[in-house]
Amino acid sequence: MLLNGVRNAAIARKQGSGANEMERAMAVSLRESVQLVSNPRNLDASVEEVFQLMLGVACRREAGPLVHEQASVTAVVGFGGLLSGACVFKSGSSTAIKIAALMTGMEFSEIDDTVKDAIGEIGNMLAGAWKGKVPDLAANCGLSVPAVITGSDYNLHVQAPEFKLHHAYRFGDSAFDVTIVCDGLQ
């Protein structure tokens, strides 16, 4: 089934059904199409697109979970609108430094504000690329400003998500995780 929410909403609006009918038409379509929204290939395509375009590196998906070095850097970008949830990018410090170096052409020896900004931007681009794969999300789901967390002893927890995609990726000897979590569909 294709996502038809925006089109149905536009028809409802044109027919004078009002905002409530427009919202219902969009929500029903997105909820009924959750299998398309949660398609893991969209996440893989988004990672491939962002890393190839922005960093010039090819990523491959890893079969199992990654073991990161103790200090890590995590970017969280929230989704709001038809879908609420977040895109979470997590890497070890050395991978974060390598990503920032590839993005900026600069060298880094530690996690500084530029590295944090680079990881926040990677999270933002991944979230945008992922939601752009589904037309209703592209038009009706906003992104928050990235929050970047650094350290060695923290966990992110979302209670009872509607769906969760979690994949590990590698480029060269660097590895990272990307998680899409949806805690609500409208």
Image (cartoon, helix red, strand yellow):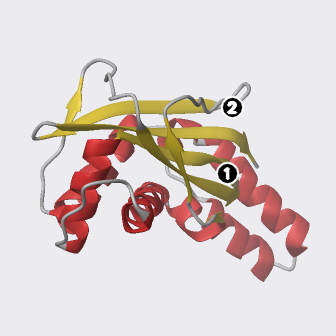
| Position of residue 107 in the picture relative to residue 123 (left or right) | left
How crowded pointer 2 is (Cα within 10 Å; few <14, some 14-19, many 20+) is rated as: few
Q: Mark 2 to mark 1: distance in Å?
A: 14 Å
Report if residue 132 is visible in the image.
Answer: yes
Residue in the image at 33% along x and 40% along y? 41
Q: Is residue 129 left or right of residue 64?
A: right
Q: Position of residue 80 (x, y in %)?
A: 70, 58
Instruction: In the rendered structure, find residue 83 and report the number of the disc placed on it.
Output: 1
The residue lying toward the viewer, choosing from 165 and 169, is: 169
For residue 73, side relative to residue 21 (left or right): left
The first of marks 2 and 1 along the sequence is 1
Of badges 2 and 1, nearer the viewer stands 2
Residue located beneath label 2 in the image: 158
**Seen in the image, is 184 located left or right of residue 32?**
right
Task: Pinpoint residue 23: horizontal percent, then vertical percent.
Answer: 80, 62
62 and 21: which is toward the camera: 62
Q: Which residue is drawn at 60% across and 66% down?
A: 145
Q: Is residue 6 above or below residue 42?
A: below
Amino acid on which disc 2 is placed? Val
Q: List x then y, in percent, for residue 59.
A: 17, 44
Above or below residue 3? Residue 169 is above
Name the amino acid, label 1: Leu
The number of numbered discs placed on residues in the rendered structure image is: 2
Nearer the observer, 56 or 98:
98
